[in-house]
Amino acid sequence: MPGRADLGSAAIGGSFAMISQDGRVVTNADLAGRPYLVFFGYAHCPDFCPTALFDILAVFKELGPDKKVAALFVTVDPERDTPDVLKAYLENFDSRIIGLTGDPSKTETIAKAFRVYAKKVPGEKTGDYTVDHTGVVYLMDKRGKFVSAFNLQRPPRQAARELEAYL
């Protein structure tokens, strides 16, 4: 189209090595061959994170248990979100949802790679806090390349069809 520059694809994502809720190292290479979603949040989140995880769960239920997909729940609160905390938090969801944590520098590095904003907000009680953070769910293809933001604000069947197109 005249007057429009081709900006190419967005530079979102990249290689990573984080600790899962099971205490094992998970890398981007472990996800090769299957599309996956990436969502940044934290286990103490009072509203947005559990809602997004339930929406992802509904999409995965529509796909069925045999579909080779994954979702990464990457913490923005590594001080509190240990592997054990993530395991307890995610045990009521689909096993294809993988919780990832690490030391603060690693979580900051992966957040920057996905262009995620995260900032602690002090609570009313001493030492208590919430974390303001980006609420985008990223769709990555089988090669780990960013496709687009994944819209969870639609019927799960419709969202599942989009994810299935990348299988």
Image (tube, helix red, strand yellow):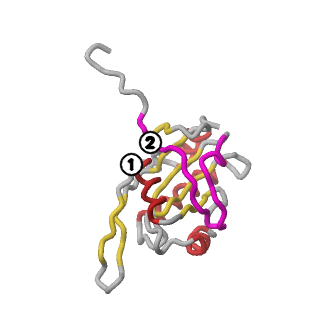
**Extreme residue toward the right, this view:** 66
Can you identify the residue that label 2 sits on? 12
Q: Quadrant of the N terminus?
A: top left
Residue at 58%, 44% in the rendered image? 160
Distance (Cα) linking label 1 and label 2:
7 Å
Residue at 59%, 70% in the rendered image? 83
Can you identify the residue that label 1 sits on? 115
Sequence-wise, the earlier of marks 1 and 2 is 2
- Magenta region includes residue 83: no
Amino acid type of the residue that numbered disc 1 sits on in the rendered structure: Arg
Image coords of residue 141 (percent x, y): 57, 38
Amino acid type of the residue that numbered disc 2 sits on in the rendered structure: Ile
In the image, 17: left or right of 65? left
**Extreme residue toward the top, this view:** 2
- Magenta region includes residue 27: yes
Sort mark 1 into few (<14), some (14-19) or many (20+) by Cα contacts within 10 Å.
some
- Label 1 SS: loop
Span shown in magenta: 10-32
Image coords of residue 94 (percent x, y): 64, 60
- Label 2 SS: loop
